[in-house]
Amino acid sequence: MTAQRGLRLLPWAGPDGKPCYLSTDDPEGYMSRLADHIESVQLGMARELLEEARQVPDGTPMNVHKLSLLAGQLAGALRDVIRVATSRGERLATPGHPEDE
């Protein structure tokens, strides 16, 4: 994901998995609030999947299908969490700061 100056990386992908960006000066606008809500849902789902993964007993044989499903869900949640972190990190950047040049 590449930072786009002045744009907010949204918590969903567009066609072909390409990142979607929002250009707005209103952090309380409809699309900003929708993105905030979806980020919150994604982070909550990641927490729930992490808890489910922690409950997998060490050394206990497990259904391969269930384990594969859990791994796929964890990978998707990690992708979402990275997108949220990237988006929030880009919005924390201070304009004019040497690291932003």
Image (cartoon, grey):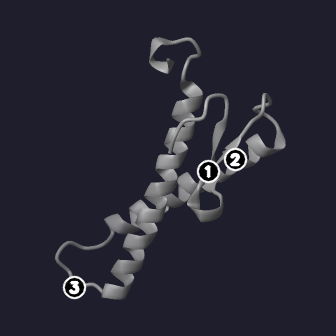
Q: Which residue in the protein does label 3 denote?
A: 61
Element class at badge 2 = helix
Tell me the CA gap for discs 1 and 3: 36 Å
Q: Which residue in the protein does label 2 denote?
A: 35
Q: Where in the figure is residue 38, as x and y percent of width and height?
A: 66, 53
Q: Amino acid at mark 2?
A: Ala
Q: Is residue 94 above or below residue 86?
A: above
Q: Amino acid at mark 1?
A: Pro
Q: Are marks 1 and 3 in contact (CB under 8 Å)?
A: no
- How many neighbours does mark 1 have within 10 angstroms: few (below 14), some (14-19), or many (20 or more)? many
- How many neighbours does mark 3 have within 10 angstroms: few (below 14), some (14-19), or many (20 or more)? few
Q: Nearer the viewer, mark 1 or mark 3?
A: 1
Q: Amino acid at mark 3?
A: Pro
Element class at badge 1 = strand
Q: Answer yes or no: is residue 8 visible.
A: yes
Q: Where in the figure is residue 46, as x and y percent of width and height?
A: 48, 58
Q: Which mark is residue 11?
A: 1
Q: Where in the figure is residue 29, as x and y percent of width and height?
A: 82, 38
- How many neighbours does mark 2 have within 10 angstroms: few (below 14), some (14-19), or many (20 or more)? some
Residue 73: quarter of image = bottom left
Q: Are marks 1 and 2 in contact (CB under 8 Å)?
A: yes
Element class at badge 3 = loop
> Residue visible at 59% across and 29% down?
91
